[in-house]
Structure formats: C-alpha cells, structure tokens
Amino acid sequence: MRYRETLGKIDEKIIHYMRRVFFPFARFAIFIIFFWFGILKVLGASPASPLVLSLLAETLPFITPETFLIYFGIFEIIIGISFTIPRFERFAIMLLLIHMVTTGLPLFMLKTITWQNTFVPTMEGQYIIKNILFIALAVGIASHLHPKQH
C-alpha cells in the first residue's frame, strides 16, 4: 500500500509541475518556431519558400515573390513575438488561426506537391499536417486564459 501511495504522490507532483510549466513552455515553443521560420523567410533562406511561392502563384499572382516572402516572414515573426507578450494571447491565437488556414491551403490547392497518394503526404504535406500541433497548443493556451470581463 505504501508503494502505491508514494507513486501517487510522485505522480501528483509531476502533474502539478507540468500544469505549472505548460503555459510558458507552450508560448515559448510557438515563439521559437514562428520567429525562427519567419526570420528565415525574411533573410531568403527558408527551405519552405518554394512551397509558399507555389501557393502564391495560385492565389495572389500579382504580388512579387520577394515582397510576399518578406511580409509573410514578418507575419510569422509577429505571431511568435505575440505569444511571448502577456495579454496578447487572444491576438496571437487569432493570427495563428489565420496562418493555419492559409498554410493549410496547399493540401487542397497544390495536391501534386503535398500528396504522393491518397493519405500519403509528401515531405511538404507532412510539414503542413504537423500544424495540427500548433492548433492543439493554441487550444491549450486558450484554455488557460481568463474570460474577458464585460
């Protein structure tokens, strides 16, 4: 019985610790990814640029690729930074959701680039599908927010 009680207390402490660190760790993780990937686009060094430019050609062909990549990179940087600023979470989540919709478009509009076969994504498709994790993190972060007072 003592063994189970000890394991229960250890488990309780671990869970308490994880609850305490989830919010700042999730915010920091999103910051790192979005800031890093955004700055790569601004610097013209992103391996995702061909995919982004293929979607651009399909949706907004009147915008120059260089200009779009810089602005898209800045948009990602803003998302990342917004997650680090207390009380900006709602704004950051809104930007993230816009980003998720736009970056999910290649799965439907660029099927030859994102799918090998039905339910078999290419590397680019996998890159996009992993964004479900960002949505899950945003939901987790939103679940820790306090309702706005009217």
Image: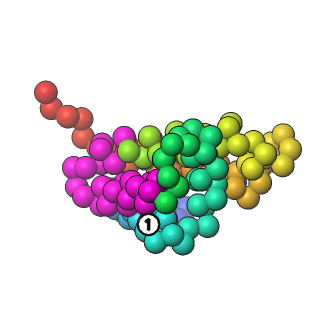
State the residue in front, 13 or 49: 49
Location of residue 57 by image quarter: top right
- Answer whether residue 140 is visible to the viewer in this image: no
Asked if residue 121 can be seen in this view, the reply is: yes
Main secondary-structure element of the magenta-colored stretch: helix
Q: In this image, 120 relative to 101: left or right? A: right
Quarter of the image that includes the N terminus: bottom right
| Secondary structure type for disc 1 | helix
Q: Position of residue 91 (x, y in %)?
A: 29, 44
Dividing the picture into quadrants, the one containing residue 95 is top left
Q: Which of the pair 128/66 is nearer the observer?
A: 66
Q: Is residue 139 magenta?
A: no
* Closer to us: 34 or 6: 34
Task: From the viewer's perspective, tell me whether residue 120 is left or right of residue 42.
Answer: right
For the magenta stretch, what is the residue range?
Answer: 67-94
Residue depicted at 20% across the width and 34% down the height: 148
- Quadrant of residue 46 within the rendered picture: bottom right
Query: Would residue 84 be counted in the magenta stretch?
Result: yes
Q: Amino acid at mark 1?
A: Val
Q: Position of residue 83 (x, y in %)?
A: 33, 56
Q: Position of residue 36 (x, y in %)?
A: 45, 69
| For residue 17, above or below residue 59 | below
In the rendered image, the quadrant that contains the C terminus is top left
Residue plotted at (75% across, 42% down): 111
Q: Residue at x 59, y 61 (%)?
A: 49
Q: Residue at x 77, y 54 (%)?
A: 122
What residue is shown with label 1? Answer: 42
The furthest residue to the right: 117
How far across and down, in percent of the image, does residue 24 sit?
34, 62
* Labels in figure, total: 1
